[in-house]
Amino acid sequence: MQVILNRQDKEQLVIKLHQEGKTIREISSVAHLSFSDIGKIIRKIDGHDDHAETKDLKNKSKDTQALFLFSKGKKPIDVSIELDLPASEVQNMLE
């Protein structure tokens, strides 16, 4: 008889196996999840789930996006390039 796990149970299983040092391939065969689903869970528990935060910011103003990027340690030139803003405008945000 095969045990059927719900999403939360699978997530806990992934975390347990990851902490045991199992590879994504090994975790996938046990948890029956795709590599991308496993990667999302691992990034979330390792604190690297910035993609979700960045995705939510796309609907925000350029100023808000710039402040977020600065809070993540980005340099003004990086913010200017990423948001396609003139360097002078980015510099004004810092003043």
Image: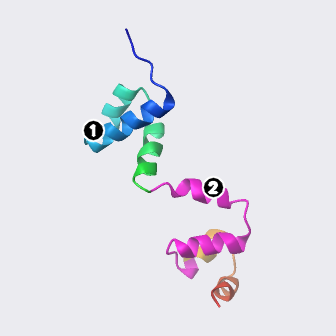
Quadrant showing the N terminus: top left
Q: Residue at x 70, y 75 (%)?
A: 63
Which contiguous range is marked in magenta?
48-77
Q: Is residue 21 visible?
A: yes
Label 1 sits on residue:
22
**Is 59 placed above or below 10 here?**
below
Q: Between residues 55 and 13, which one lies in front from this camera angle?
A: 13
Residue 13 sits in quarter: top left
Label 2 sits on residue:
55
Across and down, in percent, residue 65 comes to: 65, 69
Quadrant showing the C terminus: bottom right
Callout 2: SS: helix
66 relative position to 75: left or right: right
Circle 2 Cα neighbour tier, 10 Å, few/some/many (<14 / 14–19 / ≥20):
few
Callout 1: SS: loop
Across and down, in percent, residue 16 comes to: 32, 38
Q: Between residues 62 and 8, which one lies in front from this camera angle?
A: 8
Please state which amino acid type lies under the numbered disc 1.
Lys
Q: Is residue 34 visible?
A: no
Give me the C-alpha separation between circle 2 and circle 1: 29 Å
Residue 11 sits in quarter: top left
Q: Residue at x 25, y 42 (%)?
A: 21
